[in-house]
Image (spheres, grey):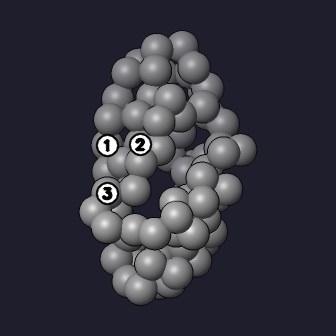
Amino acid sequence: MRAALDAAAADLRHCSERAGGLLLVEFETAQGRSEFARVMVRGKADDAVRRCVHEATRSVRFEPTDVQTFTEEYEP
């Protein structure tokens, strides 16, 4: 999962530029799924930033894993 998420990091840093700085993104996985069950921008963010994060992460795929929730920080 880490390698797949790292591949999207440049796009997510671009989203943090649109957000004006630090961007916190919460990721949630589900048992046996190879994509994120939920991706949520933490804190205040406009719709354009939320769309940016969605576009950056919608094609991320990884080996199925256990249920996890974690937050990543992205900066321009």
Outermost residue toward the top in this view? 32
Judge the density around disc 1: few (<14), some (14-19), many (≥20) Cα neighbours within 10 Å: few
Marks 1 and 2 in Cβ contact (< 8 Å): yes
Q: Name the residue: 54% across, 13% down.
A: 32
Q: Amino acid at mark 1?
A: Phe
Q: Is residue 72 visible?
A: no
Q: Earlier in the sequence, mark 1 or mark 2?
A: 2
Rendering coords of residue 39 (x, y %): 47, 44
How far apart, in angstroms, are the residues tagged by discs 1 and 2? 5 Å
Q: Amino acid at mark 3?
A: Arg
Circle 3 residue: 42
Looking at the rendered structure, the secondary structure element under dot 2 is: strand
Outermost residue toward the left in this view? 43
Q: Quadrant of residue 10?
A: bottom right
Circle 1 residue: 70
Residue 39 vs 32, above or below: the answer is: below
Rendering coords of residue 37 (x, y %): 50, 29
Judge the density around disc 3: few (<14), some (14-19), many (≥20) Cα neighbours within 10 Å: some
The label on residue 27 is: 2
Rendering coords of residue 50 (x, y %): 52, 60
Question: Residue 56 vs residue 16: left or right?
Answer: right
Question: Residue 32 vs residue 46: left or right?
Answer: right
Residue 24 vs 75, above or below: the answer is: above
How far apart, in angstroms, are the residues tagged by discs 3 and 1? 11 Å
Q: Name the residue: 32% across, 35% down.
A: 69
Outermost residue toward the right in this view? 59
Q: Is residue 51 visible?
A: yes
